[in-house]
Image (cartoon, rainbow, N blue to C red):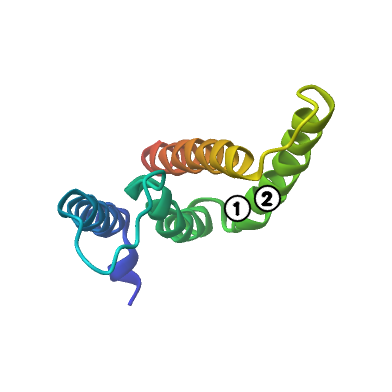
Amino acid sequence: MDKIFQWYWQLLFLSLIWLVLRLWKKFRLKPRIFSKRVKPVDILTVFILYGIHLLSLEILHVSMLPYLFLGMGLLGIGMTLVYVFIEKRLVYREFFLHYWRFVDIVVFLLYTLLLVLLFV
């Protein structure tokens, strides 16, 4: 069972999921799981979280997910305060779009960093 979760199988699995989601959105297959603003990479982030968990357990012997979720929560609170006090308004659709895109970037960077640390 341990061999299934090696890094190269993770990358292959994530690539296949991304390809399926990309084709699903391109050909507008039913059921429609994508709105106009949701991109395949937004859904792929959920699967990458599992990869981060496995890689961090292998490299650091501790899961990075609690720290990542804590950081995501603090980021959400910080973004909310910035929107309310600086822009004087909070539009939920705009907030969640910016929040989730930033989380996408952080998750991809963390996964890439863990892959690099695996080979160092």
Picture disc at residue 5: none
Residue 85 or residue 107, whichever sits in front: 85
Residue 74 position in % (x across, y down): 75, 43
Q: Quadrant of the N terminus?
A: bottom left
Task: Identify the residue at image location x=72%, y=34%.
Answer: 79
Q: Toward which corner of the image does residue 94 lie, by quadrant?
A: top right
Q: Is residue 92 above or below residue 53?
A: above
Q: Which residue is mark 2?
A: 67
Task: Identify the residue at image location x=15%, y=53%.
Answer: 27
Cβ atoms under marks 2 and 1 closer than 8 Å:
yes
Picture disc at residue 64: 1
Q: Amino acid at mark 2?
A: Tyr
Q: CA distance from mark 2 to mark 1?
A: 5 Å
How many other residues sit within 10 Å of disc 1, few (<14), some (14-19) or many (≥20)?
A: some
Residue 43 position in % (x across, y down): 40, 55
Q: Is residue 73 above or below residue 66?
A: above
Left or right of 84, for residue 50: left
How many other residues sit within 10 Å of disc 2, few (<14), some (14-19) or many (≥20)?
A: few
Q: Quadrant of the C terminus?
A: top left
Q: Is residue 30 above or below residue 21?
A: below
Residue farthest to the top? 86
Residue 49 position in % (x across, y down): 48, 56
Secondary structure beneath disc 2?
Answer: helix
